[in-house]
Image (cartoon, rainbow, N blue to C red):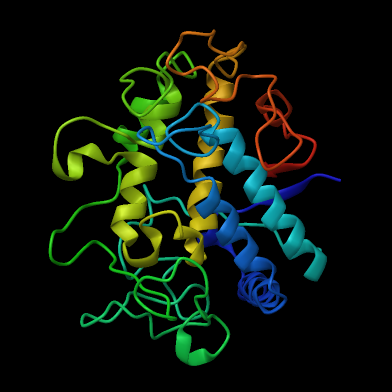
Amino acid sequence: MTYTRKNVSTLTSGEKRRFVNAMLEVKRRGEYDEFVRTHIEHYTSDGEKGLRAAHMTPSFLPWHRRFLLELEKALRRVDSSVSVPYWDWTRDRTAASTPWTADLLGGNGRRTDHRVTTGPFAYAAGHWTIKEGVTDGKFLTRDLGRARAPIALPTRSELESALSERVYDVSPWNSTVTKGFRNKLEGWGTGRGSVTWRNHNRVHRWVGGAMVGGASVNDPVFWLHHAFVDLQWTRWQARHKGARYLPAKPPGVGDEQHGRIVARHEKMPPWDVTPDQMEDVSRIYRYV
């Protein structure tokens, strides 16, 4: 049966409580830290050798779609009524708005060390100790809006710049491409400073703290953010009927991207699934 993913701002108090409780239970069972490790393991950049499955690559969207589904499976094993809500950062744009409330994700980190001290994921609550990719300590950190070097969340027009692209991705299939839906949504730009981070990437930077880098899964907002990114893929598909994941075939021998990216019918590690299989999830979930 198809289930729904809701806008986090529309959740009832009971839905918020069930989502939080399921997340905490997945963490208690040790499963959550496996997700953190998986993301760190597959956080490969252009400058590194080997296959890029999760970032700076066409499979950014199907890889994270499958990643979200795996987390959702874990949550639904705890409570079958739970799904991952999405955070529309073009609407809820301040540190005082949803999802930064005490009954959901908690608020910003304190000024001295960015430690989150409110909500169910605060270290003091005793249920959310950072164990993987630790940089600042065992506590969750945030720096919403980056007080010392402020940046703003992406706007609707910036998101529209990605949605208006007619092709999914283009050669050389990495962080340097300036055309195509995937990179305009993933958000690798040119130049210096905050302008180089667009859409998906800039949200990670805006949240700051644990959300910067390969261990960004340590902040539960990671999932709400990526659910909204995933929603954009479904909207792009609806707008551009017949547009498919690219590349359809792997780059040939001699191409600098040979063996470095996932083509439409190739499997994405660590799962036995292809981008082609992730293009249509209408029988699994829908957005409301």
**Residue 18 position by quadrant:** bottom right
Residue 30 seen in the figure:
yes
Callout count:
0
Residue 280 image-quadrant placement: top right
Residue at coordinates 21% horizontally, 83% vertically from top-left?
A: 112
Task: State whether residue 174 is above or below residue 249.
Answer: below
> Quick one: 68 or 234, which is closer to the camera?
68
Q: Is residue 255 above or below residue 27?
A: above
Q: Is residue 164 left or right of residue 21?
A: left
Percent x, y of residue 242: 62, 11
The x and y percentages for residue 176 are: 31, 24
Residue 228 at x, y = what percent?
Answer: 51, 46
**Quadrant housing residue 213:** bottom left
- The answer to whether residue 1 is left or right of residue 14 is right
Name the residue at 34% across, 21% down: 177
The residue at the point 46 percent across, 60 percent down is 215
Quick check: can you spot residue 79?
no
- Between 32 and 153, the residue placed more toward the observer is 32
> Of 157 and 259, which appears nearest the observer?
259
Rendered view: 232 above or below 148: above
Residue 251 x %, y % = 53, 11
Q: Is residue 174 left or right of residue 32?
A: left
Q: Is residue 28 above or below residue 8?
A: below
Residue located 64% across and 77% down the image = 24
